[in-house]
């Protein structure tokens, strides 16, 4: 890799949303329920391939969590990216089905690597990380809807702030056809429990599954946002592809299944993106699967780029978060007006009231957001995020990060809580952000940062 020039950030899109993501891959392990029909069996972490970039990096160090994190920190350093605000993403299957001791050891190793020091306990490592050079500002766990609710307290102890659920589709008949091993009710229960605990929730959605069609996919996709039992904060949209050593491959060769074509997927994605509300962010479209591991289905990994280019060409006004972020507007050299306003969207979800606060300009370019949930469990901030190219801690910002937008959002959300006559506001905080909240008058109580509100 060529070294960047002074001041240049190589591959700036990696940190253009304000944080530096580090994916840590789990060692191979079969899912307890067996294999879904579309899942390959390639002696690597479930649903991945030997040549998936994150698998290749992990396998080189025998899936050692400490070594994976250290290697990614060095890679980001070589590309001249800031490494102060890290989001850890634990990938590779259902982490919550691994042995409990292994789980804690794996999470602690991630913190130890960020701290560049081996601590005696996870709590010690987290305490150290509050003021570390590389702070864990968010921690994401990927899991199944049926392997989630009973482990919420455990995830909170790890410092987790986000959970990605393998939902795929909300249809029990299709779940049976693809041997998914859980129900729609599991999705509903997990979504509600996670939101009440303050987690940000992402769904993995898979159009083109066995037993579905484009019309059904669109109807069920609309249901994600029309039915208050769902309403995820984020999505990853992974159209179904036929992969080797899967049951779906055998069905494909027997002409019992055909994946969508590139043209079909593009049409469907355009319709889906137009449905997505302001409060939801599409994290990724298409999985990063090497072409040689795709038996049938589109091999175009960057299909999102083509779809969004088409939408911008038609001047489509999408609400989806990533489409509106300040960082991407700056990357594309679009004019960015700096007169800002705060907007609040209130909606019902999982038997609670969600308040989505966002700071935007007159062209609806998004600078920052905050998610507040008020339910029987109380008032809790599930996310606060200021967008733009990630900056080092203490570095003065010009647009987006480090310009006081976070404090503005926090002041406004406290007003909402006060109007609702709620006396305590909690925040599900990444370990590395605790100091930020302390400076705003919050204190650590259990695993949350809390503040008493004068009503």
Image (spheres, rainbow, N blue to C red):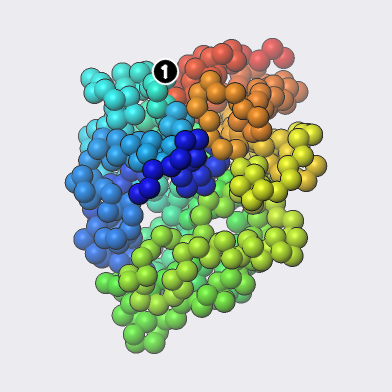
What residue is rendered at 66% in x and 15% in y?
453
- Mark 1 secondary-structure assignment: loop
Q: Which residue is the site of mark 1?
A: 131
Q: Residue 5 location, x and y as percent? A: 46, 40
Q: Is residue 232 visible?
A: no
Q: Pick the quarter of the image with the C terminus.
A: top right
Q: Residue at x 68, y 63 (%)?
A: 311
Q: Is residue 338 left or right of residue 230?
A: right
Q: Between residues 365 and 183, which one lies in front from this camera angle?
A: 365
Q: Dot 1, crowdedness within 10 Å: few (<14), some or many (≥20)?
A: some
Task: Write down the quadrant of residue 330 in the picture.
Answer: top right
- Where 452 falls versus 253 (above or below)? above
Residue at figure coordinates x 56%, y 62% from the top left? 304
Q: Quadrant of residue 150?
A: top left
Q: Of all residues shown, which one is farthest toward the bottom?
A: 255
Nearer the observer, 430 or 59: 59
Q: Position of residue 438 (x, y in %)?
A: 53, 14
Instruction: Tell which of 196 and 71 is nearer to you.
Output: 71
247, above or below 421, in the image: below
């Amino acid at each position: 890799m060529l070294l960047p020039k002074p001041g240049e950030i190589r591959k700036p899109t990696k940190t253009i949303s304000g944080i530096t993501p580090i994916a840590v891959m789990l060692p191979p392990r079969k899912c307890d329920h067996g294999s879904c029909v579309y899942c390959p069996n390639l002696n690597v972490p479930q649903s991945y391939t030997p040549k998936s970039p994150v698998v290749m990096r992990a396998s080189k160090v025998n899936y050692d969590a400490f070594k994976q994190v250290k290697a990614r920190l060095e890679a980001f350093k070589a590309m001249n990216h800031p490494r102060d605000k890290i989001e850890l993403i634990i990938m590779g299957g259902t982490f919550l089905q691994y042995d409990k001791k292994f789980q804690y050891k794996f999470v602690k190793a991630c913190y130890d690597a960020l701290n560049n020091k081996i601590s005696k306990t996870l709590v010690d490592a987290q305490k150290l990380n509050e003021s570390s050079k590389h702070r864990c500002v968010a921690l994401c766990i990927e899991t199944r809807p049926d392997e989630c609710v009973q482990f919420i307290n455990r995830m909170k102890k790890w410092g987790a702030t986000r959970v990605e659920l393998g939902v795929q589709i909300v249809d029990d008949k299709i779940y049976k056809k693809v041997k998914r091993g859980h129900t729609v009710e599991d999705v509903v229960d997990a979504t509600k429990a996670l939101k009440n605990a303050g987690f940000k929730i992402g769904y993995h959605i898979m159009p083109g599954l066995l037993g579905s069609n484009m019309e059904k996919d669109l109807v069920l996709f609309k249901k994600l946002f029309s039915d208050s039992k769902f309403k995820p904060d984020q999505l990853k949209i992974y159209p179904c592809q036929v992969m080797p050593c899967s049951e779906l491959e055998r069905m494909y060769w027997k002409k019992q299944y055909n994946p969508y074509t590139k043209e079909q997927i593009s049409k469907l994605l355009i319709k889906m993106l137009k449905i997505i509300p302001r409060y939801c962010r599409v994290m990724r479209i298409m999985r990063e699967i090497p072409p040689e591991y795709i038996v049938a289905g589109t091999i175009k990994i960057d299909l999102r780029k083509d779809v969004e280019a088409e939408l911008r060409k038609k001047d489509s006004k999408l609400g989806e978060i990533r489409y509106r972020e300040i960082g991407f507007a700056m990357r594309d050299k679009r004019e960015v007006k700096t007169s800002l306003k705060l907007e609040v969207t209130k909606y019902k979800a999982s038997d609670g009231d969600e308040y989505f606060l966002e700071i935007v300009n007159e062209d609806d370019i998004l600078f920052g957001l905050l998610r507040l949930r008020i339910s029987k469990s109380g008032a809790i901030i599930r996310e606060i995020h200021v967008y733009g190219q990630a900056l080092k801690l203490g570095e003065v910002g010009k647009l987006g990060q480090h310009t006081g937008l976070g404090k503005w959002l926090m002041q406004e959300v406290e007003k909402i809580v006060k109007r609702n006559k709620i006396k305590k506001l909690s925040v599900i905080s990444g370990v590395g952000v605790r100091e930020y909240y302390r400076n705003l008058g919050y204190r650590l109580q259990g695993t949350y940062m809390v503040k008493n509100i004068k009503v």
